[in-house]
Amino acid sequence: MKSSTPSSAQIPKVLTIAGSDSGGGAGIQADLKVITALGGYGMTVITAITAQNTLGVSRIQDIDLNVVEAQIDAVFMDIGVDIVKIGMLASPEIVRTVASALKRHGAKRIVLDPVLRATSGASLGGDDTAQAIIKELFPMATLVTPNLDEASLLLGRELTGPEDFKLAAEELLDMGPQAVLIKGGHLDTTHTQLTDFLMWRTMEDGLEVVQSKEFKHYRVNTANTHGTGCSLASAIATYLADGHDLSHAVAKAISYVEAGLEAGRFLSIGEGPGPLWHMHDFYRTALLEEEGKY
């Protein structure tokens, strides 16, 4: 039973719709860590359960469609949602279920991270899923955040470097979203400087204008990169829900993930590539001899 005591405190309410990572580094688990670290209230719709650790994904079990829908209904009907972040949707049927439910509830802001392949290389959704995402969710999306591999899958051709980003972003924007962020973290290690490319639609004097911006930053020297894509999208969503404009939200989210990667260099979690450290602002991981660098 709810208390009748008036309450005026409000924090950004962020709903993440994604898969569960049993290793805790990506997916729903990473999303909740990011949202909490950045001052939001995180809620979840679990679309799949993965048996996963730092070495890879060994099994995926999709959640029944009626359960996915019921989770969305439960959150919207009681708590409300300021922004939706979408991650892993492992089948066309789940894509259509999520899109239908979000339309029914009038979701206005959606950050879509088209998770189609794990960092380990495991497939998390085939071509049919990619096409369903384009058809059902791209037109609803405030922002789509593919990495290099995902953008290649969505466009049906290989993207090899930053020189491909502008044309790719234009083509993805033509598929319906309001904005596209192509992430450059999957560039080969010869690229010590990474480029993330943002393109978005805006209105000026009653006319639609397309703008773009490059975010250049240096690659953090670490093997612990598990969950970076999920974390970046969740950070952008939380900053947007907190009132930042798109370009500023993206810049702040990139800085947050960079700091998490830097802090995560000192962690030893699992035998494979571990996660970034989401709670770097609260719990330091630097070794004693390294502390003077911070």
Image: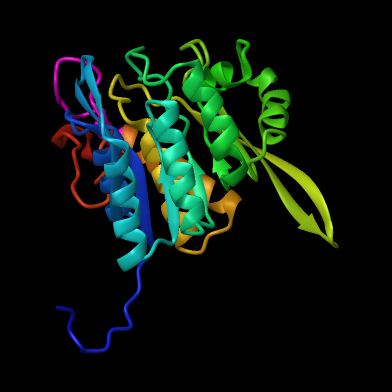
Instruction: Please name the residue shown 35% across and 20% down the image.
Output: 118
Q: What segment is highlighted magenta in the picture? A: 262-275
- Judging depth in this view, the residue of 89 and 147 nearest the camera is 89
**Could you tell me what secondary structure mostly forms the magenta stretch?**
loop
Residue 184, percent across and down? 53, 24
Q: Position of residue 85 (x, y in %)?
A: 42, 46
112 relative position to 30: left or right: right
- Quadrant location of the N terminus? bottom left
Residue pictured at 65% horizontal, 45% vertical: 178
Q: Is residue 207 left or right of residue 83?
A: right
Q: Which quadrant holds the C terminus?
A: top left
The one of 250 and 281 positioned closer to us in this rendering: 250
170 lies above or below 11: above
Question: Relative to 211, does residue 265 appear above or below in the rendering?
Answer: above
Q: Residue furthest front?
A: 66
Q: How far across and how far down the image is residue 98, in percent?
A: 42, 42
**Count of all numbered marks drawn on residues in the image:** 0
Residue 273 colored in magenta in the image: yes
Q: Please give the name of the residue rendered at 50% of the width and 19% of the height, measured from the top-left corner.
A: 128
Magenta stretch encompasses residue 155: no
Q: Residue at x 33, y 32 (%)?
A: 261
Q: Nearer the viewer, residue 214 or 2?
A: 2
